[in-house]
């Protein structure tokens, strides 16, 4: 089986996905429950091993860290835009939007990943969380590259840092 995708959860994933805990052709890092191969996950990666998972198993010390690096390996086909991370207790959204606006005004079109919206270059989508899961972030960054975005301003929540969602990202500042 060839792994073609990575996911943080195993639910409703297409065949060929790798999840934090993953099944048939996919890598997933599931948090709860049984992961039937029928869900399309090729391999599950987690620590410790669970006998409840009915799929090939890869035991790793840190499933989320593994997911971040697996996502980088699967999706990073070109160098990502220059990453500017904004973190802190208050003001992440305001600061990130202001930085993205200043970069745009200076002739350096910037992508934005934040609490309210993900601006990817040719499209804008409503944000599902402040800092996307590692596989989503890698896909979004590649979309920004394809759209000519040289920089991405990204809100980085403390929760995302703790969950290793940004562990494989090359932040510039």
Image (cartoon, grey):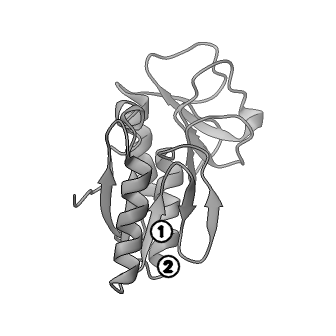
Q: Which mark is residue 146?
A: 2
| 97 versus 19 height, above or below | below
**Residue displayed at 63% across by 28% down:** 55
Which residue is at the far top? 51
Q: Is residue 32 visible?
A: yes
Q: Nearer the viewer, residue 40 or 148?
A: 148
Q: Position of residue 124 (x, y in %)?
A: 62, 67
Q: Position of residue 149 (x, y in %)?
A: 42, 77
| 79 versus 20 height, above or below | below
Q: Position of residue 87 (x, y in %)?
A: 32, 44
Q: Position of residue 172 (x, y in %)?
A: 22, 61
Q: Residues within 10 Å of mark 2 (few under 14, many from 20)?
A: some
| 66 versus 50 height, above or below | below
What residue would you read off at disc 1? 142
Q: Is residue 154 visible?
A: no
Task: Say if mark 1 contacts mark 2, CB within 8 Å.
Answer: yes
Q: Which mark is residue 116?
A: none
Does dot 1 land on a helix, a strand or a loop? helix
Does dot 2 land on a helix, a strand or a loop? helix
**Residue displayed at 65% across by 34% down:** 10
Q: Nearer the viewer, residue 89 or 160?
A: 89
Q: Nearer the viewer, residue 142 or 72?
A: 142
């Amino acid at each position: 089986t060839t792994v073609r995708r990575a996911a943080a959860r195993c639910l409703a994933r297409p065949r060929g996905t790798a999840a934090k805990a993953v099944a048939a052709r996919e890598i997933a890092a599931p948090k709860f429950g049984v992961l039937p191969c029928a869900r399309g996950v090729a391999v599950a990666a987690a620590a410790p091993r669970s006998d409840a998972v009915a799929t090939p198993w890869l035991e790793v010390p840190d499933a989320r860290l593994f997911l971040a690096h697996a996502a980088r390996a699967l999706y990073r086909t070109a160098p990502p835009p220059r990453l500017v991370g904004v973190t802190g207790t208050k003001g992440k959204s305001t600061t990130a939007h202001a930085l993205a606006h200043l970069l745009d005004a200076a002739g350096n079109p910037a992508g934005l990943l934040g609490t309210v919206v993900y601006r990817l270059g040719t499209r804008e989508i409503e944000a599902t969380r402040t800092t996307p899961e590692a596989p989503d972030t890698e896909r979004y960054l590649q979309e920004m590259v394809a759209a000519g975005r040289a920089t991405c301003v990204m809100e980085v929540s403390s929760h995302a840092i703790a969950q290793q969602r940004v562990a494989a990202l090359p932040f510039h500042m």
